[in-house]
Image (cartoon, rainbow, N blue to C red):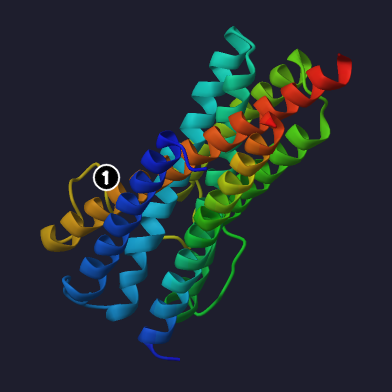
């Protein structure tokens, strides 16, 4: 494997973990706000 | 549905994310190649900031809120602890994974049981242990107390990780950022590395803030449900 493969693999792991966690938090917030709205009615 | 607080946190997250990617761009295209390692050294612009975030920010954040919770046992401090543990686990995994990927072409191995790597793995397991403990205990002052004690114990691993390269004979290179004899990196590399550290910490703070609010909303909903069931 050349240098570029290692670099892409490393940054790929970082990107997937950070973005995945962040998008998960946004999705969770959306679900919580929906539950909050439903509980008011 | 989205409230102004949600929008603010979302915008802060987008700003932090864009800055972090800008740091990566600088690392990839605006820094010179390293004399002996070539281009593969560029992994350090993700590895070192992730390690600095995991050790310097998330573990420290966990320690501060653990001490606060022991002083005044309140659920808000426990939520802050839990959020730091999650963010800490994410950045410790990135540190281990990028270190492993970097180790293959430079040391010739994906993994070795040397002091710094092993103590960093221990930190990841401790963050995971904290989350399992938090999940397994019923809500109340006892959970706050027990989790806070573990939070303080987790921090003990941080100076051990930092000093591991000087305490033991290890494969891992010694500190190249802060060294007693002075700087060991070229200024153009060091400036980008410092920027990447700042931007990664910014991303960690944005993630932590968002998680704390999510936990608070979830707790509010649970309390509301409990009140309804009682009445």
Residue B128 relative to residue B179: left or right: right
Q: Position of residue B223 (x, y in %)?
A: 73, 22
Residue at 34% across / 44% down in the picture?
Answer: B12
Residue B183 relative to residue A27: left or right: left
Residue B167 in the image: above or below residue B48? above
Residue B131 in the image: above or below residue B70? below
Which of the 4 quarters of the picture holds residue B32? bottom left
Residue B12 relative to residue B89: left or right: left
Q: Position of residue B143 (x, y in %)?
A: 75, 22
The quadrant of the image that shows the C terminus of chain B is top right
Q: Position of residue B178 (x, y in %)?
A: 27, 45
Q: Position of residue B142 (x, y in %)?
A: 78, 16
Where is mark 1, residue-wise?
B178
> Residue extending furthest front?
A41
Q: How many marks?
A: 1
The one nearer the camera, B71 or B11, is B11
The one nearer the camera, B62 or B173, is B62
Q: Can residue B174 be seen by looking at this rendering?
A: no
The chain carrying label 1 is B
Residue B9 in the image: above or below residue B98? above
Residue at 29% across / 79% down in the picture?
Answer: B39
Dot 1, crowdedness within 10 Å: few (<14), some or many (≥20)? few
> Residue extending furthest top?
B71
Secondary element under disc 1, as helix, strand or loop, is: loop
């Amino acid at each position: 494997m050349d240098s570029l493969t290692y670099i892409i693999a490393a940054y790929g792991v970082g990107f997937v973990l950070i973005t995945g966690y962040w998008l998960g938090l946004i999705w969770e917030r959306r679900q919580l706000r929906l539950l909050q709205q439903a509980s008011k009615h | 549905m989205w409230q102004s607080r949600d929008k603010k946190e979302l915008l802060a997250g987008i700003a932090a994310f864009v800055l972090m990617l800008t740091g990566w761009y600088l690392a990839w295209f605006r820094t010179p190649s390293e004399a002996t390692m070539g281009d593969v050294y560029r992994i350090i612009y993700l590895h070192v900031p992730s390690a600095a975030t995991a050790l310097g920010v998330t573990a420290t954040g966990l320690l501060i809120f653990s001490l606060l919770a022991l002083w005044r046992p309140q659920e808000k401090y426990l939520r802050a602890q839990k959020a730091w543990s999650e963010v800490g686990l994410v950045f410790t995994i990135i540190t281990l994974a990028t270190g492993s990927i970097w180790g293959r072409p430079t040391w010739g191995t994906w993994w070795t049981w040397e002091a710094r790597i092993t103590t960093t793995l221990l930190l990841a397991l401790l963050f995971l242990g904290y989350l399992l403990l938090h999940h397994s205990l019923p809500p109340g002052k006892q959970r706050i107390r027990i989790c806070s004690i573990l939070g303080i114990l987790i921090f003990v691993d941080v100076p051990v990780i930092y000093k591991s390269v000087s305490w033991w004979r290890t494969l891992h290179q010694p500190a190249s950022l802060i060294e007693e004899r002075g700087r060991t990196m070229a200024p153009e590399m060091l400036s980008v590395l410092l920027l990447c550290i700042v931007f990664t910490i910014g991303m960690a703070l944005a993630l932590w803030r968002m998680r704390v609010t999510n936990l608070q909303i979830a707790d509010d909903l649970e309390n509301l449900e409990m009140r309804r069931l009682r009445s």
